[in-house]
Image (spheres, rainbow, N blue to C red):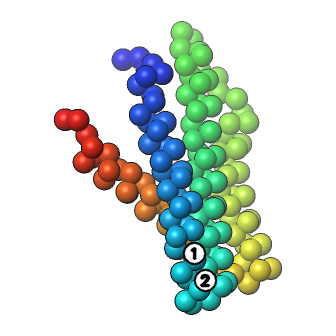
Amino acid sequence: MTSTSTDASPYRLTETHISRLTLLFGIITAIPVAHFYAWRWGLGVLIGAILAWLNFRWLRQGLDALTNAATAQADQKKVRVPLATYVKAALRYGLIGLAVYVIFEYLNVPLLSMVVGLCALGAATMVVSVHGIFRSPE
């Protein structure tokens, strides 16, 4: 079964919704946390959500690069993926870990608040998935 641009459009739309909802959930959660609890906690939630959003975007770019390389070389026996694609995928987690460490050490933002912010991606994914189930034409 071949993939066409019309087949990919619902998936691209789902990815866009997840991406936007991740940031929206981070902002919606960070504001009351900063107001009612502590501004550093609110900042941590927002930073975590932004890091989750970046991670999702980088993951999508990496998978797009792998898909494009495989599609372009569909007639070849051995598909060659650029080394930079693998390096970016591996460094993605290292970069996020380094950012969390620097923010935790120098801005004194609680680590737990950033972890809560990282959960915005999971929440967004669940909301979009449940929405997709209920809107399914089947």
Location of residue 127 by image quarter:
bottom left
Image x and y of residue 33, in percent:
55, 82
Residue where numbered disc 1 is placed: 30
Does residue 115 appear in this view? no
The picture places residue 101, in percent across and down from the top left corner, at 73, 72
Q: Are marks 2 and 1 in contact (CB under 8 Å)?
A: yes
Residue in the image at 57% along x and 90% along y = 37
Residue 51, image x, y percentages: 64, 61
In the rendered image, which residue does mark 2 sit on?
34
Residue 52: name its quadrant: bottom right
Judge the density around disc 1: few (<14), some (14-19), many (≥20) Cα neighbours within 10 Å: many
Which secondary structure lies at badge 2?
Answer: helix
**Relative height, residue 113 to residue 57 (above, below):** below
Residue 25 located left or right of residue 136: right
Q: Which amino acid does label 1 sit on?
A: Ala
Residue 84 versus residue 30: which sits nearer the camera?
30
